Amino acid sequence: MRLHSGLPYWIIKDQLYDYYNPLREDIHTDVAIIGAGITGALAAHALCKAGLECCVIDRRSIATGSSAASTALLQYEIDTPLHILADKIGEENAAKAYHACLNSISDLERILQEAGIEAGFERRPSIFYASDHNGEETIMKEFEIRKRHGLPVEMLSRKELHERFGINTPGGALFNRESAQVDVYKAASSLLAHDMKNSGLRVFTHTDITGYEQDWADCCLTERGGHTIRCRYAVIASGFEAGQFLPEKVMKLTSTYALVSHPVERARLWPEEALIWETAQPYIYMRTAGNRIIMGGEDENFSNPRRRDRKIGKKVAILESRFRELFPDIPFRAEMAWCGTFSSTDDGLPFIGPWDEGDRVYFDLGYGGNGITFSVIGSQIISRSMTGYYSPDDWIFGFGRVRKQTDGR
Ligand SMILES: Cc1cc2nc3c(=O)[nH]c(=O)nc-3n(C[C@H](O)[C@H](O)[C@H](O)COP(=O)(O)OP(=O)(O)OC[C@H]3O[C@@H](n4cnc5c(N)ncnc54)[C@H](O)[C@@H]3O)c2cc1C
């Protein structure tokens, strides 16, 4: 699968790393993690910290999958509004999922700080504006339910939004100060480098895992060249390409578009450089990166890379014009653009854990617009499970949700 095309900004800004280390022999380890993106990097970090011997395997260069293409906004609010998620999984569980996302932002900040990694992590406020009349209703309902569950949220009227942030929106917005942004390509690659140096983590790139077997005692991964990795546990952190390892399809693959602007005088950017997104589906969103603006959205319900790529020019023009509607006074022109595969689930939550209870293979699939916060949560759930701890709420992110619908369990 071509996970992205065009030029993701981060690969140019941070450079493409030359690390090359294909697996050339059969090995043994405690945990083998498939995927050297942010999910695999965070899982490896948590597991190394828990004292387990780990290796990470990737068919590509380090972090050049979806993590390189990410626009990397970090928000506690997921693609499925809390009041809708409450209808799907119950209000208490939905609120727990939202709180887990909220905590994961500070957890990521702490992980990077403790490891001494400077990966552009910056705290930012977040604005979720009503795109239309229906959106007004959404933000009213969201405000009430988020308040009820102690989530950080303020309501801004259209006038306040314009006066404080200079945004021309059709309606009001929800606002919070608990969001952040990061350079996730740098975070993933630096975290892997940190654990290779400090925790004996082994990383094998350009190594394609083609299958696995497991029994009660251990599991064994096989790579395309025939070498094997025998381990106590395996973690599948292979992002949107995990379909090959899943017994059933649990996600919908879509296409998404992103661009980075020419540099803009910093003083002309909007106040506080808040993250901005909207209630419409699909939504547009934006953040800053230094003196540039990163914007994304215009998702489409197909994943064919050739069809996706053909649309880049048209999508850039739409995103530029949407930006100018919101901020007519900020000079905005795309400098480079890219598009990528994206994945969503029915309830907007990720899939973390074994497919069946007792399996030695764990999935760590942060599907949805909050993939990075989900990766943090995944690393915590998986390291807990593999070291014998269990939190009764972990099931909220597990496969029991879909298994109930598909086979009645
Ligand atoms: C344009 C765009 C914008 C986004 N914006 C945001 C955002 O603002 N906020 C947010 O939280 N999330 C966002 N996301 C989602 C987020 O980027 C992803 O959830 C996250 O990067 C996924 O990381 P990952 O490590 O799971 O996957 P990846 O980074 O794709 O890593 C998985 C790795 O597994 C490897 N792999 C797959 N199969 C195999 C195999 N069989 N053998 C060996 N290796 C294999 C791949 O080569 C890949 O490197 C965005 C995504 C895109 C595309």
Image: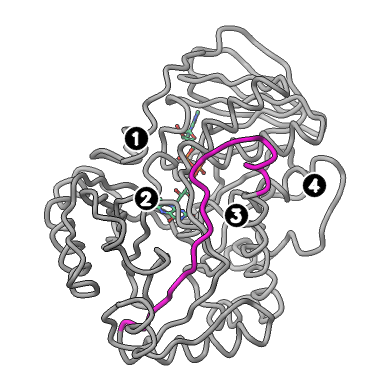
Question: Where residue 153 is drawn, which disc sits there?
Answer: none
Circle 1 SS class: helix
Q: How much space separates mark 1 and mark 4, taking CA atoms?
A: 35 Å
Local crowd at mark 1 within 10 Å, few (<14), some, or many (≥20)?
few
- The residue tagged 3 is 351
Magenta includes 112? yes
Q: Earlier in the sequence, mark 2 or mark 4?
A: 2
Q: Position of residue 331 (x, y in %)?
A: 17, 61
Q: How much space separates mark 1 and mark 3, taking CA atoms?
A: 31 Å
Circle 3 SS class: strand
Q: Nearer the viewer, mark 3 or mark 2?
A: 2
Q: Are marks 2 and 1 in contact (CB under 8 Å)?
A: yes
* Residue 145 drawn above or below residue 371: below
Residue found at the very far front of the displayed protein: 267
Q: Nearer the viewer, mark 1 or mark 4?
A: 1
Q: Residue at x 23, y 39 (%)?
A: 6
Residue 363 or residue 261, whichever sits in front: 261
